[in-house]
């Protein structure tokens, strides 16, 4: 049988597709303090659950490949690239997104520092930068500019607001 015949291609496609690949499974998360349960395809990333199912679009999709940090959220207090994580891996976990950090009327100190230091231009990377910067406070990171830059190196800013971001982080560390 020729490998190019349609029957052959159909057979291959069927063979490569796991029988239950798309069977939805229940997922329970505590998101920004609120328990929520959704049925998800096991292949769905945490990022897509947050943005597409829970309408929490403050968390951004930049590269969708773990390279930019725009999708950074906290999972049980630790920063995670939500695009690299299957949602079901976090069943029962506590998730914090930028929407759960502060409110326009009551900003988290890191959000206020970003505003004060003008630490953004287009803003697309900003929620990821802030979530990373907040998590950094609980990590073994020294206080020098070089150490903070290294610890924040997974968050890319295409606008190049790095010096302002660093200034904002340094302000909160000194506060
Ligand atoms: Fe997740 Fe870029 S969107 S790292
Ligand atoms: Fe535009 Fe960072 S502010 S990518």
Image (cartoon, rainbow, N blue to C red):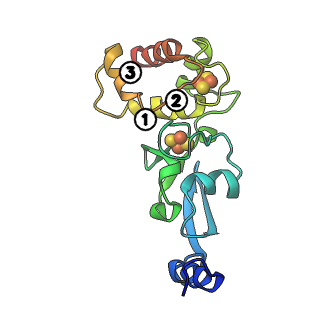
Query: Which residue is at the front of the view, 40 or 66?
Result: 66
Question: Which numbered marker is on residue 50?
Answer: none
Question: Which numbered marker is on residue 149?
Answer: 3
Label 1 or label 3, whichever comes before in sequence order:
1
On-image quarter of the C terminus: top left
How many residues crowd mark 1 within 10 Å: few (<14), some (14–19), many (20+)? some
On-image quarter of the N terminus: bottom right
Q: Residue at x 57, y 85 (%)?
A: 11
Disc 3 secondary structure class: helix
Q: Which residue is labeled 2 in the image?
A: 129
User: Tags 1 and 3 in contact by the CB under 8 Å rule?
Assistant: no
Question: Which numbered marker is on residue 135?
Answer: 1
Query: Which residue is at the front of the view, 11 or 31?
Result: 11
Q: Residue 38 placed where, x, y %?
A: 64, 67
User: Tags 2 and 1 in contact by the CB under 8 Å rule?
Assistant: no
Q: CA distance from mark 2 to mark 1?
A: 10 Å
Q: Residue at x 50, y 60 (%)?
A: 86
Q: Residue at x 35, y 14 (%)?
A: 145
Q: Residue 13 placed where, x, y %?
A: 57, 78
Q: Residue 162 placed where, x, y %?
A: 50, 17
């Amino acid at each position: 049988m020729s490998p190019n015949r349609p029957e052959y291609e159909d057979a291959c496609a069927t063979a490569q597709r796991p029988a239950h690949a798309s069977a939805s499974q229940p997922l329970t998360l505590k998101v920004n303090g609120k328990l929520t349960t959704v049925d998800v395809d096991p292949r769905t990333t945490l990022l897509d659950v947050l943005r597409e199912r829970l309408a929490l679009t403050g968390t951004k999709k930049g590269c969708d490949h773990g390279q930019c940090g725009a999708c950074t959220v906290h999972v049980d207090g630790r920063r995670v690239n939500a695009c690299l994580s299957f949602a079901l891996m976090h069943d029962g976990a506590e998730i914090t997104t930028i929407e759960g950090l502060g409110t326009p009327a009551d900003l988290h100190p890191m959000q206020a520092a970003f505003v004060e230091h003008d630490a953004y231009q287009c803003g697309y990377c900003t929620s990821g930068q802030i979530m990373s910067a907040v998590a950094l406070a609980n990590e073994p990171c020294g206080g020098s500019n070089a150490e903070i830059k290294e610890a924040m190196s997974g968050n890319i800013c295409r606008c190049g607001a790095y010096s302002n971001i660093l200034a904002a982080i340094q302000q909160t560390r000194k506060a």
